[in-house]
């Protein structure tokens, strides 16, 4: 995609529609460059992966982008800015209830200290029937 025009790449679209098979095909292209900085409604690539609870896509991206650990860690700690009165709404915040996805995010640089108790409690309470 053309980042300057705000058009997402095919990978960003595949993540948005939660299509792991398409993500795998795209990441196998030898010349493919991820548009890391594209945001959709304030959410980066990892926010959307967390919202879909898709550990498979997360692993494909982090394993397929070995030279980009610093960029991945930075994105895992980006806030959408929508919950600033409660703390940070990073991708880790949206990974609930998947403990496995949360653990993988922490392994790749998500800072658990950016979440606070009130934020975590409200998110847990709102997500329960």
Image (cartoon, rainbow, N blue to C red):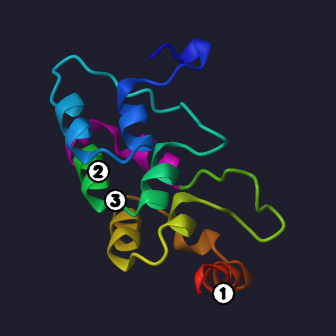
Residue found 46% across the figure and 33% down from its top: 36
Secondary element under disc 3, as helix, strand or loop, is loop
Using the image, tell me which numbered label, if any, was put on residue 125: 1
Establish if 98 lies above or below 79.
Answer: below
Residue at the extreme right of the image, as rendered: 85
Secondary element under disc 2, as helix, strand or loop, is helix
- Pointer 2 local density, CA inside 10 Å: few below 14, some 14–19, many at least 20: many
Instruction: Confirm or deny contact between disc 3 and disc 2 (CB under 8 A).
Output: yes
127 or 36, nearer to the observer: 127
Secondary element under disc 1, as helix, strand or loop, is helix
Which quadrant does the C terminus fall into? bottom right
Percent x, y of residue 2: 49, 13
Where are the magenta residues, as a range?
A: 63-76
Q: CA distance from mark 1 to mark 2?
A: 27 Å
Using the image, tell me which numbered label, if any, was put on residue 75: none
First-in-chain label (1 vs 2)? 2
Horizontal side of 109 relative to 38 (left or right) equals: left
Q: CA distance from mark 3 to mark 1?
A: 22 Å
Percent x, y of residue 51: 49, 59
Residue found 26% across the figure and 21% down from its top: 32
- Pointer 1 local density, CA inside 10 Å: few below 14, some 14–19, many at least 20: few
Instruction: Confirm or deny contact between disc 1 and disc 2 (CB under 8 A).
Output: no
Q: CA distance from mark 3 to mark 2?
A: 6 Å
Residue found 23% across the figure and 47% down from its top: 60
Establish if 119 lies above or below 59.
Answer: below
Horizontal side of 38 relative to 15 (left or right) equals: right
Percent x, y of residue 91: 52, 59
Residue carrying label 3? 54
Asked if the stretch drawn in magenta spans residue 57, the answer is no
Establish if 100 lies above or below 6.
Answer: below
Residue carrying label 2? 57
Residue found 60% across the figure and 12% down from its top: 5
């Amino acid at each position: 995609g053309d980042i300057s025009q705000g058009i997402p790449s095919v990978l960003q679209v595949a993540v948005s529609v939660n299509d792991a098979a398409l993500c795998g095909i795209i990441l196998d292209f030898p010349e493919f460059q991820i548009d890391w900085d594209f945001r959709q409604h304030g959410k980066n690539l990892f926010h959307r992966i967390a919202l879909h609870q898709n550990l498979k896509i997360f692993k494909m991206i982090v394993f397929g982008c070995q030279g980009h650990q610093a960029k991945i860690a930075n994105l895992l700690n980006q806030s959408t800015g929508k919950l600033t009165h409660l703390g940070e709404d990073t991708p880790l915040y949206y990974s609930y209830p998947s403990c496995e996805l949360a653990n993988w995010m922490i392994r790749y640089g998500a800072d658990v200290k950016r979440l606070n108790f009130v934020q975590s409690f409200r998110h847990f309470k709102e997500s329960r029937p």
